[in-house]
Amino acid sequence: MECEFPTVNATNAEMKAILDEVKTIAVLGLSPDSTKDSYRVAEYLKNAGYTIIPVYPKEETILGEKVYRSLAEIPGAVDMVNIFRKPDALGPIADACIERGDVKVFWAQKGIVNNEAAERARNAGMKVVQNHCSMVEHRLNNR
């Protein structure tokens, strides 16, 4: 897939509001490797007070939290999905979010853009962020 410029995206004010409102974040692609961005961002968000739910194909726990294999396996509500996957994975992730029916925010991390998936998520009522790091945005808005 070719790199895309995000045509569906939240404004800075909307990102601040998102990070002020959400409580539970499913981190898709959360690696157990502490040198990876997904681990560092999830650890930061957990320390900032968010409930983190790891979604990863292996491991039993990451950051002291039970790991789920898919978004569909997570019991209880998920406010936001924070995505550390390749852009072509966003279509099925958007579908899984829509199927759950409780995801309020579809957040694709820095460097991850899929406008078609983002449009589907937005049309289903989710707020959408693409190509932004949730940790960086949280730090910018909480100085």
Image: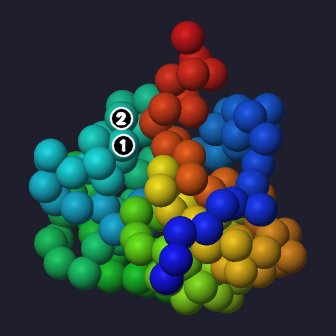
Where does the C terminus fall, quadrant-wise? top right
Residue 139 at least partly seen: yes
Residue pointed to by mark 1: 41
Q: Is residue 2 above or below residue 79?
A: below
Residue pointed to by mark 2: 44
Q: Is residue 60 above or below residue 52?
A: below
Q: Is residue 87 above or below residue 88?
A: above
Expressed as whole percent of the image width and height from the top left, the position of residue 74 reads 46, 75
Few, some or many residues within 10 Å of mark 1 (<14, 14–19, 20+): many
Question: Which of the 4 quarters of the picture holds residue 107?
Answer: bottom right
Q: Residue furthest top?
A: 143
Residue 49 at least partly seen: no
Question: The disc labelled 2 sits on which kind of residue?
Answer: Tyr
Question: The disc labelled 1 sits on which kind of residue?
Answer: Val
Q: How many marks?
A: 2
Mark 1, secondary structure of its residue: helix
Question: Which of the 4 quarters of the picture holds residue 93?
Answer: bottom right
Mark 2, secondary structure of its residue: helix
Expressed as whole percent of the image width and height from the top left, the position of residue 31 reads 22, 61
Which is nearer the eye, 118 or 127?
118
Query: What residue sits 64% from the left and 38% below the top?
Result: 19
Expressed as whole percent of the image width and height from the top left, the position of residue 27 reads 42, 61
Q: Which mark is residue 106?
A: none
Structural distance between the alpha carbons of marks 2 and 1:
5 Å
Query: What residue sits 36% from the left and 35% below the top?
Result: 44
Whether residues under marks 2 and 1 lie with C-beta atoms below 8 angstroms apart, the answer is: yes
Residue 83 as seen in the image, left or right of residue 63: right
Residue 74 as seen in the image, left or right of residue 122: left
Query: What residue sits 29% from the left and 73% below the top?
Result: 56
Query: What residue sits 66% from the left and 61% below the top?
Result: 5
